[in-house]
Amino acid sequence: MKYHLVTLGCAKNTVDSMRLEAALRGGRHLAVDAPEQADLLLVNTCGFIDAAKDESIGVVRELDANRRPGQQIVVVGCLTQIAEDEVRRAVPGIDATFGAEQWDAIAASVGAASETYDIPISTLPVLGQPSAYLKISDGCDRPCTFCIIPTIKGRMHSGPARNLIAEARMYAAAGAKELVLVAQDSTAYGEDEGDRDGLAVLLEELSEAVPEVPWIRLMYAYPGKVTPRLAESMATLPNVVPYLDMPLQHGSDSVLRRMKRPTLAKARRSIEIMRAAVPDVVLRTTFIVGFPGETEAEFRQLLRFMEEQEFDRVGAFTYSPQPGTPAAEMPGQVAEAVKQERYGRVMELAQQISLASNRSMTGREVDVLIESREPATSASGDPVSVGRTYRDAPEVDGMAFVKGVHAMGSIVRARVDGALPYDLLCSPVDAPVRA
Ligand code: SF4
């Protein structure tokens, strides 16, 4: 059977889709790019915020409207987990729905293929990019009042280290230059086994298992859960990049209390531990603006906290109520116009800080991992390859533009000539150092 899979939502959903595809490949089904060539249309949905929900339903509707007789349509993932009826009402022609984490059941439902396909599994094009996401755990035990994830995904469960190492080796063999560790809460890794330093141990094991992968990156740390051993691992392991993403969600303790998130003191302690052990660490965080009851004074505390900590990278979201979460029922829901205005102010400040951080790189030499298949063209008409330094995570952070034509997946030594709020402008200083 040939299938066409559309993945919506976050990086973690991308990893889920890779697992689903592994199960489908196990059944010897073949992926196709064009929906019209497929026997099976699969959509891995996201239900995290209203916009994502609308997008998911829109994609399913469009595939349904254009499908030919005999083509099946199966909808899976977070949205069907929490709102199956709604999805079925919106698109009555759907053949089947599955919730999250039912990859083997989905693969089994479409049966074994009648034909044998020779599917390459050890070439870079399988990844489609030089970076691969490694989902180290799933589910979440935290009580954040705005978040539906614990309801969707259930309790946190860590992936067995031996499976994660095998997966990492597979990506390394496929040519991956970067492994991005993701989870709902990466610092909880191992806690379900009673191990407080499970993440540090996993980093050590991965670093040793795939020394040929130059960048191992950690996303989604929980404030207050950065242990000295974790910081030490990041400082000493040669292929773990000094980059930490720690979503803080707000910079006011009263808002954090309503969110049931850790206090600023805990966040500051984690940042201190990390900066003391890894002086050149790049810190990324995310904030939610317009949480119920957020006053102008609380919002200004958030801006002051951003100035105090000078996060290199900041992502922001406007609060969007999730049915079934405590925050959706809280009094003092903030008007949309106020949320948008505060979002603009956060991003303006974030840009200034990011620009200063990028400017501090001017004149320095960096390694750039090239991600573009084809070079872009600069304003002067010259070719420019697009990539990233370790200071930017894929999909969420900025880019580095390197003059010249460089192969996707190569790492180019380059000098930073100029800085933009999010991106770096670079010139190569010699031949690719690792191809
Ligand atoms: S830690 Fe993250 S996934 Fe877990 S409840 Fe909080 S926001 Fe949701």
Image (cartoon, rainbow, N blue to C red):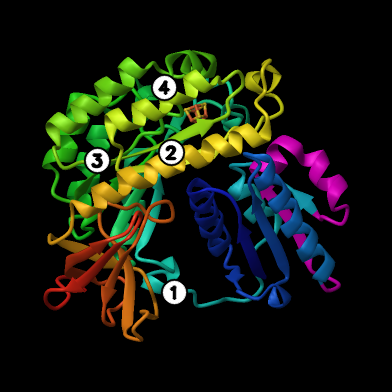
Binning the other alpha carbons within 10 Å of mark 4 as few (below 14), some (14 to 19) or many (20 upward) gives: some
Structural distance between the alpha carbons of marks 1 and 4 = 53 Å
Q: Is residue 188 visible?
A: no
Nearer mark to the viewer, of 1 and 3: 3
Structural distance between the alpha carbons of marks 4 and 2 = 29 Å
The amino acid beneath tag 4 is: Gln
The residue depicted at 30 percent of the width and 50 percent of the height is: 355
In the shown orientation, is residue 247 left or right of residue 259? left
- The mark that comes first in sequence, 2 or 1, is 1
The residue carrying mark 4 is 301
Mark 1 within 8 Å of ligand 1, using the beta carbon? no
Structural distance between the alpha carbons of marks 3 and 4 = 35 Å
Is there CB contact under 8 Å for labels 1 and 3? no
In the rendered structure, find residue 183 and report the number of the disc placed on it: 2
The residue carrying mark 3 is 203
Q: Position of residue 7 (x, y in %)?
A: 59, 57
Structural distance between the alpha carbons of marks 2 and 3 = 14 Å
Binning the other alpha carbons within 10 Å of mark 1 as few (below 14), some (14 to 19) or many (20 upward) gives: few
Quadrant in the rendering for residue 381: bottom left
Please give the range of residues in magenta.
Answer: 68-95
Nearer mark to the viewer, of 1 and 4: 4
The amino acid beneath tag 2 is: Ala
The residue depicted at 81 percent of the width and 55 percent of the height is: 95
- The mark that comes first in sequence, 4 or 2, is 2
Name the foreground residue: 352 vs 10.
Answer: 352
Q: Does the magenta stretch include residue 323?
A: no
Structural distance between the alpha carbons of marks 2 and 1 = 28 Å
Q: Position of residue 221 (x, y in %)?
A: 36, 33
Nearer mark to the viewer, of 4 and 2: 4
The residue carrying mark 1 is 120
The amino acid beneath tag 3 is: Leu
Screen quadrant of the N terminus: bottom right
